[in-house]
Image (cartoon, rainbow, N blue to C red):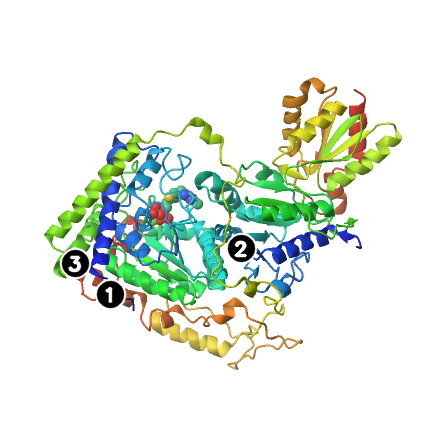
Amino acid sequence: MAPVTMLEAIRQAIFEEMERDPTVVAIGEDIGVYGGAFKVTAGLLERFGWERVIDTPISETAIIGAAVGMGYQGLRPIAELQFIDFIACCFNQITNFAAKSHYRWGAPVPMVMRGPSGGGVHGGPFHSANPEMYFVHTPGLKVIYPSTAYDAKGLLKSAIRDNNPVLFFEHKFLYRRIKEELPTEDYTVPIGKAIVRREGRDLTIVTYAAMMHTSLEAAEELAKEGIEAEVVDLRTLLPLDKETILQSVKKTNKLLIVHEDTRTGGIAGEIAAVACEGAFEDLDGPILRVTAKDTPVPFSPPLEERFLPNKNDVISTARELAQY
Amino acid sequence: MSQPLTREQHLDLYYYMKLNRMLDEQLVRLFRQNVVVGGLYSNLGQEATSVGTAYALEKRDWIAPMIRNVGGLLVKGYKPRDILMQYMARVDSPTMGKDGTSHFGDIKVRHVVSPISMLGDLVPVMAGVAIGGRYLGQNIVAMTWVGDGATSTGAFHEGMNFAATQHAPLVLVVENNQWAYSTPVAKQVPIHDLADRAKAYGIASAIVDGNDVMAVYQTTKEAVNRCRAGKGPVLIESKTMRMKGHAQHDAAEYVPKEMFKYWEARDPIARYEKYLTENKIWDEKTKKELDARIDKELKEDLEFAEKSPLPPPELAEQGVYCDGCHTVEAVWNRSKAEVTPPKSSVKPEWEVTDFGGFDLASTMAKQSAAAGENGGKDARIISQGTHKNTAHKPQQRPNGGAAKSAQHPARNFERQQPASQKFKGQKSPSQRMMDQKTNGQPEKSSAVARVPFGRGPKGKEGRK
Ligand SMILES: Cc1ncc(C[n+]2csc(CCOP(=O)(O)OP(=O)(O)O)c2C)c(N)n1
Ligand SMILES: [Mg+2]
């Protein structure tokens, strides 16, 4: 099989799940006739018809609300947010309606909310956000943010089959930039399991999404200096795989967290607390983080470049940490 | 028109309304004894709206109640003990103490969706339930209620618009009880009849005397039939009155005393009792028996509720996620083959029949007709521009535009016309309300064309 992009992997996951299970339906803006702003849902309408591929008015609250209602009917809706930034418009439906439903009255909401996220493509303040932490802070949700085509497909399939409301972030910088050969047979990747992408003895880099690739590149350069970094790809942010994080920290005794989300309130703070609670005695240095700046995502290329963390930031912070 | 009600059904309506009210009174006593945890929201005066609407549904239909729709929950088969224990935060309540009030439901058996506090949010959710049911071939109707205040939310608008574009089998009951907390409806919405909102969604609507249970029932039944026949959503405005403050803590001093008096004279239960007597549907003995049954059931349920303990603390940490504890199952009433390839396959194209051009002549003609109807009150501003009274032809797209598409579900339904031409015949909403006589028996109070206190008393400060 020829290698496929992450975008194609996501499309395959939706397509194959809809093929496998007629309770799976898709809903969103311009997803049918047009095939979605990024063409993730191209070909779905043709194959599955108007009842299963629902083009909606520009109403994020209605999209998520209706998906919750269809979930109560035993369906498994996949709701697309045209850009993940628009998720702010339906925050209430997600955090108050969907997230609390099973806890309050035992009604599962088997729904996936997915959309393109992240910066690096000059999308400006409203088409580049990483709003994952609003939702990581909401019990009842699951939050997935894959970095590879294989994981994207396998995790999306798991999300569709899950009985809980799952947020699935698709980093648009990675959509067409990474390619991978995928198995021909049906497979899933479990939600809530991190993976070690690169083994190393000197320090642990915990990261996810586009920054996973940045961290891997940094690790290769660090290796030339004799610093062997272990790179842990979280893949799922909620529930957080504390075990894999702690295992790695106990091995390397040093922890660096890298994310594209802004600094204050980013998941780095949470991971630092997890490490302090679970591996304090194993730490040989401060817990450091490389993140985006605490500003909105700016538009013009030099501004966005300044805003985003990059390979050199990871390398220099890792060097600093390796000194301890 | 719907089938006339049997004697048993007539008595059912009384039973549920009276039970709703007695339960309300019981809860007030418990509140005063400090047994209720948190706030208590009265249903007083709105029993006919909750019961009459819910009673028009079939068992398979879905509801989502708001806080003053305990009557609807009773019709759906919940017991007073469920509501009592919700308010008392006991472990045997439907939510085991995790939530209070009418915030509970059951998707599998009773088809009740639990509300959340955020007003208006149920509208899109119930639109989803409605189209989900249609997809599965269930031929169900979904119904929810919103207050006059809740119609101001964005969720209400998005939900109604989505439901309308989907022709969803959704009945939306706008419970206009004149107040949203301390805010009178005139300060909430700058139109007199909330049913007029339906025009903007191109859906059918009705206005009903919400304190006349027969009128509420009949109007809803018609709306439900219409929905079930695939004719799209219906908005029913029920004119009623919240007879207490927003909750127990609120003495409602902002409500004019005469307004309470006006509505007291239109108490839904007293009116229905009179109707049952005048139409010889019951006698004093039947009433006594029903009242005794209600007393007995309430007493038993109160005993049960009081015996139920508060939940064990460890329950707080359980049930955030569904880890297989509940199954997700769809009830299919159609062949899955219809929605799976290759049978589901379609040509992915829009059918575009109207190119959307501006036709000055017909717009002006429509406008002057409308101006004649309402004295030009909401006349649209029309500029002739460069067109000197010549009709403007819609532009042709270079590619010819319209392409035929395969069966979009919406295409199977009638083209939307102004609601007044369909559901309402040629009648205006207020005329329709006049027609909603108590089972064909004219009753003076329901025959008014306009509810005088609908916007607060004339001349009062609050009207400005
Ligand atoms: C979105 C939202 N904003 C504010 C509130 C607080 N609140 C609860 S009930 C209420 C008034 C509701 O009025 P209405 O919709 O007319 O319903 P009623 O209480 O009259 O039944 C308000 C403001 C809320 N629950 N939800
Ligand atoms: Mg109100």
| Marks 2/1 same chain | no
Q: Is residue B16 above or below residue A36?
A: above
> Which residue is at a point 31% across and 68% down the rendered structure image?
B428
The quadrant the C terminus of chain A occupies is top right
Q: In the picture, residue B232 is in which quadrant?
A: bottom left
Give the residue at the far top of this rendering. A281
| Disc 3, SS | helix
Which residue is under mark 1? B4
> Which residue is at a point 22% across and 61% down the rendered structure image?
B6
Asked whether, in this view, residue B322 is left or right of residue B213, the answer is right
Label 3 Cα neighbours within 10 Å, binned few <14 / some 14-19 / many ≥20 = some
Chain containing mark 3: B
> Nearer the viewer's eye, disc 1 or disc 3?
1
Residue A59: assigned label:
2
> Which residue is at a point 65% across and 39% down the rendered structure image?
A236
Which residue is under mark 3? B275
Chain containing mark 2: A
| Label 2 C-beta lies within 8 Å of the nearest ligand 1 atom | no
Give the residue type at disc 2.
Ser
Asked whether, in this view, residue B161 is left or right of residue B247, the answer is right
Q: Residue B281's spot in the image, x, y percent?
A: 15, 59
Q: Number of callouts in the render?
A: 3
